[in-house]
Image: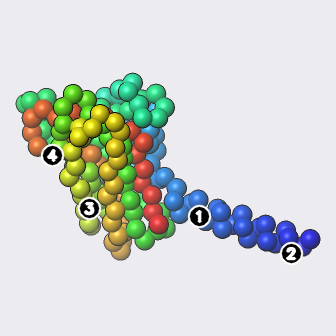
Amino acid sequence: MKLAILGLAVVLALVGLSASAHANLLSNPGFETNSFTSVSTPFDTSISTDIWGRTTSVFRSADARTGNFSLEVSQASNESNKGFEQIVTVGNGTNGTFTIYHKQVSSSSVFKAYLRYLDSNRTLITSFSKTFTVGLTASWASVSVTGTKPGGAAFAQVIIVTNSSGVAKGRFDDASYTES
Ligand SMILES: [Ca+2]
């Protein structure tokens, strides 16, 4: 009986470790809560942690992959650097992965996803990025950026931003930042 209880405790501890190692560290990852802060460009390292920062021309859309809302970027012809970001305290993992789902609005557009690591003074240490196209299909697709956490990393900053000036549109949902 004692062995059985001990065994159960070990299993529960392992399950707990496994869950925390792959936990999504982002707040409001599906944009269901209407809580945002404003940024001029989505590279602002001074915003509060655990809240999405968004530029103008970024708003919630009722076209959701899950839940009731997604976040839509609708950059106009005379605009650039529109997008959104979040800064979180890093976890205990060695590698980080930022994943987000995207879908076209009315035409294909090129965006860039960033996973950046900041030190305790919020100075950029390392930046990983991937350029991707929204709108190859009308269904939801995902993009991921993975990188090794540098020494001294205190915060992870995830960013979606348009890749060039001019009209660019896309809807985004179900973001995650995990460590392993
Ligand atoms: Ca959602």
Whole-percent x, y for residue 176 in the image: 42, 50
Residue drawn at 25 percent across, 62 percent down = 127
* Along the viewing direction, whichever of 81 and 168 lies nearer the viewer: 168
Q: From this viewpoint, is residue 31 visible?
A: no
Q: Secondary structure at mark 1?
A: helix
Instruction: Specify whether 161 is left or right of 98.
Output: left
Q: From this viewpoint, is residue 137 visible?
A: yes
Measure the alpha-carbon separation of dots 2 and 3: 47 Å
Mark 2 or mark 3, earlier in chain: 2
Above or below residue 165? Residue 153 is below
Measure the alpha-carbon separation of dots 1 and 2: 22 Å
State the residue position of label 4.
163
State the residue position of label 3.
128
Q: Quadrant of residue 12?
A: bottom right
Q: Secondary structure at mark 2?
A: helix
Measure the alpha-carbon separation of dots 1 and 3: 25 Å
Q: Which mark is residue 42?
A: none
Mark 4 or mark 1, earlier in chain: 1
Instruction: Specify whether 161 is left or right of 26.
Output: left
Near mark 2 (Cα within 10 A), the count class, few <14, some 14-19 or many ≥20, is few
Above or below residue 21? Residue 107 is above
Determine whether label 4 and label 1 are within 8 Å by CB: no
State the residue position of label 2.
3
Determine whether label 2 and label 3 are within 8 Å by CB: no
Q: Is mark 3 within 8 Å of ligand 1?
A: no
Near mark 3 (Cα within 10 A), the count class, few <14, some 14-19 or many ≥20, is some
Near mark 4 (Cα within 10 A), the count class, few <14, some 14-19 or many ≥20, is some
Tag 4: residue type?
Asn
